[in-house]
């Protein structure tokens, strides 16, 4: 079958969507060829459907023409899942939007994929609710992208990820069929759970066109704490102790000594030189119980090595405490020319082994490694700081990263908690998932997308080497 030319692609798409819903000029398309992984590939065209019928028509045409189709939210992902590696067409969901429908009586919201996380939170808050997933990019990231990557954030430790907070989906499969999954209730066991299967599949099974999301009432009260420790080992023991008692924090963030050192000058936080690790903790609940809840968490956190407990009891103090955490990512970008950013997860009780192992690998390979993240569920963001112009250092970093993944799997962990696989981790997936399971996953992909047009090459190891993308560099 002869592939259509770029000119023919543009003509066919404009016929289906209209002139103002298709981009084909190179300068216009480049902006949709990359995400926050810093990887990039030029698509042949970019389309902006405004309803599910247009999505279906584009998918059906791409399927018949055997043209790759990559769905894209706002491009905030860090794993390259939105990069059109095999060119083809990028389908932007930014026009698939409407005011979220909030149903307070049933604690749910019906949302289009182009709505941002922040817009949903604002709409839900007007009725006294929130949607728990809160990625760092929540101000700009889209609900469709959150679902495609199962992106969570700090609140996942208490409230779960998108998979736990989504009741059902409407979507279009790779051969252009519309399907509806899930229920409008919080209980239901009829049929297989296709909702959770599609969430986190990075657009490789179906393109989400609508989601029914489970909302949670806003808490009456919230308290924020900052706990400093002499070293990482004592902070890690505190995390395990906190998660072993009945009160679950709504956020439990971790920073190691290197992270603290790097932000001290950048953000000017009031942090003593002797601090080797920090925990940022948020506790929420009923106003009448919040003090007791905070006391329980602090009591569990009082392990050997605790230096100080700082309680923020005003909005200004809360903002000052969280400034430390929010300053970290820009600080890293200013300090190092490049960072390889991974979001590994281990059982909470094994965080001490993970951190000590990462420190050992940093010494062995002469690579600076900075660790922070969502310690309450063992999700640690491991950042290898490198100079991409130093070939010897880049080779050491690649070897070190491979050893990092081996260490995580030895500790019964997983290679990604919320960033996804995309392009940057696909070559490592076979280390975690056995051949039989991988084959089952490929067969499931084929049922949804028989001609493999939806985001081909993402998530699962490629059958053959694909050119044009350098793996695991973000």
Image (tube, rainbow, N blue to C red):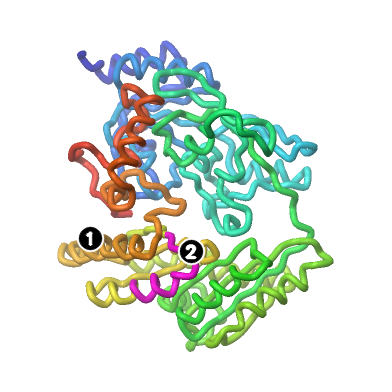
Q: Tag 1, which secondary structure?
A: helix
Badge number at residue 238: none
Residue 11 sits in which quadrant?
top left
At 81% from the left and 64% from the top, the residue drawn is 287
Q: Is residue 141 above or below residue 408?
A: above
Q: Main secondary structure of the magenta part?
A: helix
Frontmost residue, 24 versus 180:
180
Circle 1 crowding by C-alpha within 10 Å: few under 14, some 14–19, many from 20: some
- Is residue 395 found left or right of 193 in the rendered image? left
Q: Which residue position is annotated with label 2? A: 378
- Is residue 447 found left or right of 110 in the rendered image? left
Q: Which residue position is annotated with label 1? A: 398
Which range of residues does the magenta coloring cover?
A: 345-357
Question: Marks 2 and 1: CB-CB under 8 Å?
Answer: no
**Horizontal and vertical percent position of residue 325:** 53, 67
Q: Is residue 420 above or below residue 330?
A: above
Frontmost residue, 390 versus 230:
230
Q: Tag 2, which secondary structure?
A: loop
At 27% from the left and 20% from the top, the residue drawn is 6
Frontmost residue, 305 versus 387:
305
Residue sitting farthest toward the left? 392
């Amino acid at each position: 079958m002869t592939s259509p030319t770029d000119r023919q692609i543009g003509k066919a798409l404009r016929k289906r969507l209209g002139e103002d819903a298709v981009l084909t000029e190179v300068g216009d398309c480049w902006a949709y060829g990359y995400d926050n992984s810093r990887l990039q590939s030029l698509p042949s065209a970019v389309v902006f459907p405004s309803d599910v019928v247009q999505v279906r028509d584009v998918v059906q045409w791409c399927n018949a023409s055997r043209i790759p189709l990559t769905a894209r939210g706002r491009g905030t992902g860090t794993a390259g899942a939105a990069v059109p590696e095999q060119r083809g067409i990028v389908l932007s969901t930014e026009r698939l939007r409407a005011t979220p429908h909030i149903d307070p009586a049933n604690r749910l919201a019906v949302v289009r994929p182009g709505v941002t996380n922040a817009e949903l939170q604002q709409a839900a808050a007007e009725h006294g609710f929130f949607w728990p997933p809160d990625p760092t990019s929540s101000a700009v990231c889209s609900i469709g992208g959150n679902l495609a990557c199962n992106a969570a954030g700090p609140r996942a430790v208490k409230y779960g990820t998108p998979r736990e907070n989504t009741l059902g989906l409407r979507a279009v499969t790779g051969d252009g069929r519309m399907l509806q999954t899930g229920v409008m209730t919080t209980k239901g066991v009829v049929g297989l759970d296709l909702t959770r299967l599609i969430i986190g599949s990075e657009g490789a099974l179906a393109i989400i066109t609508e989601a029914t999301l489970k909302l949670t009432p806003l808490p009456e009260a919230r308290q924020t704490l900052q706990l400093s420790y002499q070293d990482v080992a004592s902070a890690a023991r505190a995390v395990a102790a906190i998660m072993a008692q009945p009160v679950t924090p709504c956020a439990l963030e971790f920073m190691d000594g290197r992270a603290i050192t790097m932000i001290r000058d950048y953000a000017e936080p009031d942090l003593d030189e002797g601090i080797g690790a920090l925990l940022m903790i948020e506790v929420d609940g009923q106003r009448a119980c919040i003090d007791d809840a905070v006391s329980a968490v602090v009591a569990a956190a009082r392990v050997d090595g605790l230096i100080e407990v700082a309680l923020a009891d005003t909005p200004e103090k809360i903002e000052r405490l969280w400034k430390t955490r929010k300053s970290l990512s820009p600080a890293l970008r200013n300090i190092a020319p490049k960072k390889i950013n991974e979001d590994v997860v281990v059982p909470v009780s094994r965080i001490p082994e993970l951190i000590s192992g990462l420190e050992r690998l940093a010494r062995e390979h002469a690579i600076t490694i900075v660790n922070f993240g969502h310690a309450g569920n063992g999700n640690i963001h491991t950042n290898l700081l490198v100079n991409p112009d130093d070939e010897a250092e880049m080779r050491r970093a690649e070897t070190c990263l491979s050893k990092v993944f081996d260490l995580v799997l030895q500790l019964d962990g997983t290679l990604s908690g919320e960033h996804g696989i995309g392009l940057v981790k696909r070559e490592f997936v076979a280390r975690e998932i056995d051949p039989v399971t991988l084959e089952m996953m490929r067969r499931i992909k084929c049922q949804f997308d028989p001609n493999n047009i939806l985001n081909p090459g993402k998530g699962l190891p490629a059958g053959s080497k694909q050119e044009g993308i350098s793996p695991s560099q973000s």
